[in-house]
Image (cartoon, helix red, strand yellow):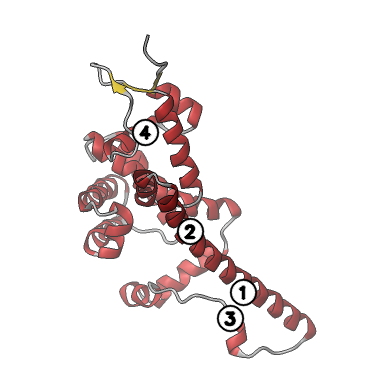
Amino acid sequence: MGEVAWSIAEVARESGVTSRTLRHYHAIGLLIPARTAPNGRRYYEEEQLLRLQQILLLRDLGLSLDVVAEVLERRSSASTIEVLGRHEEWLLREQLRIGQLIRTVDTTIANLSEGGEMKPEKVFEGFEHNPYEAEARERWGDEAVDASYERMRGWTEQDVEFARTGQVRVHEGIAALKAEGADVHDPTVQELIQLHYEVTSLFWTPNRAAYKGLGQMYVDDERFRRTIGGGDDSVVEYLRDAMTVYADTNLSE
């Protein structure tokens, strides 16, 4: 008698990972099912469930899928410690930076409460320069960038969380749908683009031309191609094409 196996639907239900994401993990070689039935249905055994557990643990640490694959591929304790060690270094640097920001805010509050003055270098201590700001101001103008910052200042906690997680959901979902061969006009694809538009609208509200231009910028700019496609430019082009369909269908000039 063979080992007990669970269908993709059962694994999705128990793990909280969508079937689409599991299919994407299969497509990129991150999580190969124990077997695939003639009808295409995937089945997972204990070995795959334990691997999925590792994937989810590593994702919770904030690791990208590329780094997760690297950790799991190497398998040895020494290499895993090395990869996690590099990530820990980043987390510690980020912890120090945030700690400095907290101290800067505390000092500012104290000085304002006491009517004191602060030197400029103390006012901005701990803040990172946004490398995209100058480029954004040149591309879209000061008024648009300032309006975006003003909009962000009015965010609720839900808005912050939506901005943090929404883009990741879109990028992973788009990659999975492309791997399945879904047409960019498919309602499931367009639902994801609706999510993308809603996340984008937290910062600014693009019209038809602007939203299509944003999609083209993703393709033209290496930084966005790397972030969105993870080395697969065709995923970025797929996102652009889906955004174009959404814009032509739903947005006005």
Q: Position of residue 213 (x, y in %)?
A: 26, 60
User: For the residue marked with disc 1, what is the amino acid?
Assistant: Gln
Residue at which label 2 appears: 85
Could you tell me how far apart the alpha carbons at marks 3 and 4 are, in whole angstroms? 44 Å
Assign the N terminus to one quadrant of the image. top left
SS label for mark 4:
helix
User: For the residue marked with disc 3, what is the amino acid?
Assistant: Glu
Q: From the viewer's perspective, is the residue at label 3 or at label 2 nearer?
A: 2
Relative horizontal placement of residue 242, taking residue 115 as reference (left or right): left
Q: Position of residue 94 (x, y in %)?
A: 54, 66
**Residue 22 in view (yes/no):** yes
Assign the C terminus to one quadrant of the image. bottom left
The relative height of residue 74 versus residue 180 in the rendered view (above or below) is below
Q: Position of residue 96 (x, y in %)?
A: 59, 70
Q: Residues within 10 Å of mark 2 (few under 14, many from 20)?
A: few
Name which quarter of the figure residue 10 lies in.
top left
SS label for mark 2:
helix
Residue at which label 3 appears: 125
Question: Answer yes or no: do the residues labelled 3 and 1 have beta carbons within 8 Å?
Answer: yes
Residue at which label 1 appears: 100
Residue at which label 4 appears: 22
Relative horizontal placement of residue 179, taking residue 7 as reference (left or right): left
Q: Earlier in the sequence, mark 2 or mark 1?
A: 2
Q: Earlier in the sequence, mark 4 or mark 1?
A: 4
The relative height of residue 215 versus residue 12 in the rendered view (above or below) is below
SS label for mark 1:
helix
Q: From the viewer's perspective, is the residue at label 4 or at label 2 nearer?
A: 2
User: For the residue marked with disc 4, what is the amino acid?
Assistant: Leu
